[in-house]
Amino acid sequence: MALTQRLEFRQSQSLVMTPQLMQAIKLLQLSNLDLSAFVEEELERNPLLERASDGPEPPVAGEPSPERGEYAGGEEQGPAYGDESGSEPSEMAGGSAGDSFEPGQEDWMNRDLGSRTEIEQTLDTPLDNVFSEEPAEAAARTAQDAAPTAYTEWGGGASNDDSYNLEAFVAAEVTLGSHLAEQLAVAFTGPAQRMIGQYLIDLVDEAGYLPPDLGQAAERLGASPAEVEAVLAVLQKFDPPGVCARNLSECLAIQLRELNRYDPAMQALVEHLDLLAKRDIASLRKLCGVDDEDITDMIGEIRRLDPKPGLKFGSSRTQTMVPDVYVRPGPDGGWHVELNSDTLPRVLVNQVYYTELSKNIRKDGDKSYFTDCLQNATWLVRALDQRARTILKVATEIVRQQDGFFTHGVAHLRPLNLKAVADAIQMHESTVSRVTANKYMATNRGSFELKYFFTASIASADGGEAHSAEAVRHHIRQLIDAEDPAMILSDDTIVERLRATGIDIARRTVAKYREAMRIPSSVQRRRDKQSMLGNALSAPAASSDRSRDTQPA
């Protein structure tokens, strides 16, 4: 085999991911908030980009009004704020035409008032009594007593123009940390104790709980565990009751001590909350050493306590979900799909500004910079338009595929995957996956994420059309909600009833769906419903006993 050198020409095709293409793909999966933040950054970075809502700025005195993007041409320009001579209109001079001085009104300023004695005789009082202060002091007092003429003089950072915002005067929401810090400043005087207390307050979560293990806190602060426990004991007496607890039992115990109800029986109940969650009333009654009536009253007291006392105070602001697509019933019986225009940033390319700059730029570096800005701005406008079209196309196909859901409800939700939608709109599955990420649809049955409509299929027992997994979950919940307290449905019984309706499903799948919907087992549901039934039966008996006691002898 001979080894030789030679030159060959080969032609091949490959997909090159340019930075702009990668950015366009990234825009597809951004939510409306992330997209708005991205556009704001581009507006600050690119001088050739501008918002579509931005109008022409007021013209500067002595200069012609600039032409900008699509706002150029056709519009009348308003009057200039001043002319070259520096004169101002009468409305801006501080008064109207009717308030101007007449020539005779200024003669008194040039009149000779005479000597001091003549002035005192005219005023009928000494001058010291009239002008008792020095001119500088009098001017300062006058300025101090004068009423503010603008909003800025009242404080608060407001202004007397159209940007005056009342929200600037709204008090900040009191958080749990600040509320505890105020009490800490009063409870401790020593700097070491305040430092330990502030460190523990910083560890409190939104619900008002501390981590279970505080040993690491003592090591970091260089304090003994006894000192940390002493400060913690004081913090647990702060408002709201139950704050700074390390677990639920400790939180409830703190609140019961505050109410003077933490006796040995209640202590045993608080220490065995797992039995209370299982509705094992018989075991709790033995551990507490009380009868049925007392254990019922004790459980009622536990239910009236607050398991998360920290949630009463302000926390991080929750962002409201804003839908990207609206689905409304059409006049012809179909569905009208439209994009939410509020979530679509509108930007324009200022071609006129670029043309003016191109005439005056001489440096090659500046020319290349503005050329790149023009290309990036043009690409962004096209990418945003393509993103909106793609979202609308995918949403329209989802509505077409899930017409039964919008008409009849979740029980008629069909099995749907990404490939079915991608094939229908002639796009790739990855594109559909990115479009449906972090996007929401507002319908007549509520707001749903676009991924909600993509569900797995469950085979039919009679060989018919497959069922959607979400529809099967809904059917399971309906069966459990309608069950008789005396005849609780087990998972096997649910499987049999589903197969009777044509749904072929395994028992482990029913258990998985039930746990995903946070529905307890049949044993736990039996205890819960029997307890609720017993409370409902005991309430009328107790009320009748009270009515008999109140009858006159």
Image: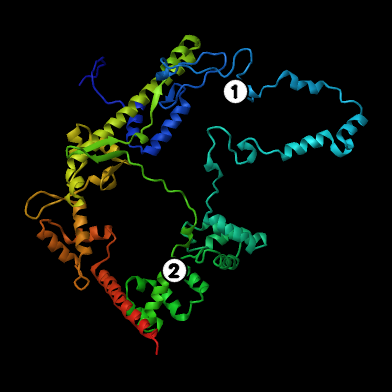
Q: Is 189 placed above or below 549 here?
A: above
Q: Is residue 135 left or right of residue 211?
A: right
**Circle 1 is placed at which residue position?**
91
Specify the amino acid type for callout 1.
Glu
Q: How many C-alpha atoms fall within 10 Å of the one at disc 2: few (<14), some, or many (≥20)?
A: some
Does the image show residue 221? no
Does the image show residue 425? yes
Q: Is residue 342 left or right of residue 260?
A: left
Name the quadrant of the C terminus.
bottom left
Residue 198 at x, y = what percent?
A: 59, 57
Residue 536: image quadrant is bottom left
Q: Nearer the viewer, residue 380 or 351?
A: 351
**Circle 2 is placed at which residue position?**
305
Tell me which label, 2 or 1, sits earlier in the chain: 1
Residue drawn at x 80%, y 23% is 109
* Mark 2 and mark 1: Cα distance apart in space: 66 Å
Residue 230: image quadrant is bottom right
Q: Is 125 placed above or below 204 here?
A: above
Q: Secondary structure at mark 1?
A: helix
Q: Secondary structure at mark 2?
A: loop
Specify the amino acid type for callout 2.
Leu
Q: Nearer the viewer's eye, disc 2 or disc 1?
A: 1
